[in-house]
Amino acid sequence: INGGFGMVLDGSKESEYRLKSMLFWDVNNGIARRSWARNKEAIFAIKRAMELEPNLKVTLPNLVDDKLLE
């Protein structure tokens, strides 16, 4: 279910900051969800994002060798 999202951009410096912040966190939230699904490219991307932004903390999935699950 998507409840929707709305943001007013009035051209102020504050709205610019809020837009950049929202886009950063929204995009990384999507990457994190894909990494939890064990998508290797998403795991790589979220690790790189955490290196670039110290305030971003994401729990990474534990990968299991498929042979252990047989």
Image: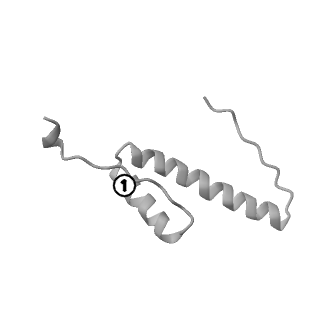
For the N terminus, which image quadrant? top right
For the C terminus, which image quadrant? top left
Q: Is residue 15 above or below residue 26?
A: below
> Is 40 on the left or on the right of 21, as rendered?
left
Which residue is at 68% across, 32% downward? 3
Where is residue 53 shown, x and y percent of the image? 54, 68
**Residue type marked 1:** Glu
Which residue is at 70% across, 36% downward? 4
> Is 41 on the left or on the right of 14, as rendered?
left
Q: Is residue 28 above or below residue 51?
A: above
Where is residue 65 shown, x and y percent of the image? 18, 47
Q: Under tag 1, what secondary structure? A: helix
Where is residue 21 shown, x and y percent of the image? 67, 60
For the rendered model, the colour scheme is one colour
Q: Nearer the viewer, residue 31 or 36?
A: 36
Which residue is at 14% across, 41% downward? 68
> Is 50 on the left or on the right of 41, as rendered?
right
Q: Is residue 66 above or below residue 48?
A: above
What residue would you read off at disc 1? 41
Which residue is at 51% across, 71% downward? 52
Q: Mark 1: few, some, or many residues within 10 Å (few <14, many ≥20)? A: few
Q: How many marks?
A: 1
